[in-house]
Amino acid sequence: MKFDAIAIGSGQAGNPLSFALADLGWKVALIERADLGGSCINTGCTPTKTMVASAQVAHYARDAARWGVRAGDVSVETSARRHARAPDGFSGFLLALG
């Protein structure tokens, strides 16, 4: 099989480049050794931002009395599964597109 381009890694650059070249009519192979979408969406940037946002909301809730708001006990679910990867990763996103 022959390709016009081979993209190694389906991260932030690999996916858009592959789609752009395919839209131009190029025959493209996209190679990914692990989770489609790369580390950012599956274990890095996206889950980390989710965890930071959860911590920020918990901080605001714990400090609510300062603003005249009464809040009960506040806790953040920190299970490894919740923050280890995006809910369905990029593969789930692609499957949802149909």
Image (cartoon, rainbow, N blue to C red):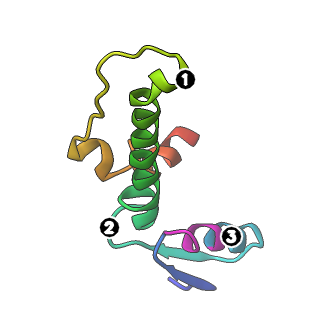
Q: Is residue 12 magenta?
A: yes
Query: In the rendering, at what x and y percent does residue 84 appear?
Result: 29, 52
- The residue carrying mark 3 is 22
Counting every numbered tag in the picture gives 3
Numbered label attached to residue 34 = 2
Q: Is residue 79 left or right of residue 49?
A: left
Q: Residue at x 69, y 77 (%)?
A: 26
Q: In the image, which is nearer the foreground, mark 2 or mark 1? A: 1
Q: In the image, which is nearer the foreground, mark 3 or mark 1? A: 1
Q: Which residues are magenta?
A: 11-17
Identify the amino acid type marked 3.
Ala
**For marks 3 and 1 on the same chain, the one whose residue lies earlier in the sequence:** 3
**For marks 3 and 2 on the same chain, the one whose residue lies earlier in the sequence:** 3
Which quadrant holds residue 22?
A: bottom right
Q: Is residue 46 magenta?
A: no
Query: In the rendering, at what x and y percent does residue 93 appear?
Result: 50, 45
Query: In the rendering, at what x and y percent does residue 30 appear?
Result: 50, 73
Q: Is residue 37 left or right of residue 17?
A: left
In the rendered view of the protein, which quadrant contains the C terminus?
top right
User: Quick check: can you spot residue 67?
Assistant: yes
> Helix or strand or loop: what does disc 3 sit on?
helix
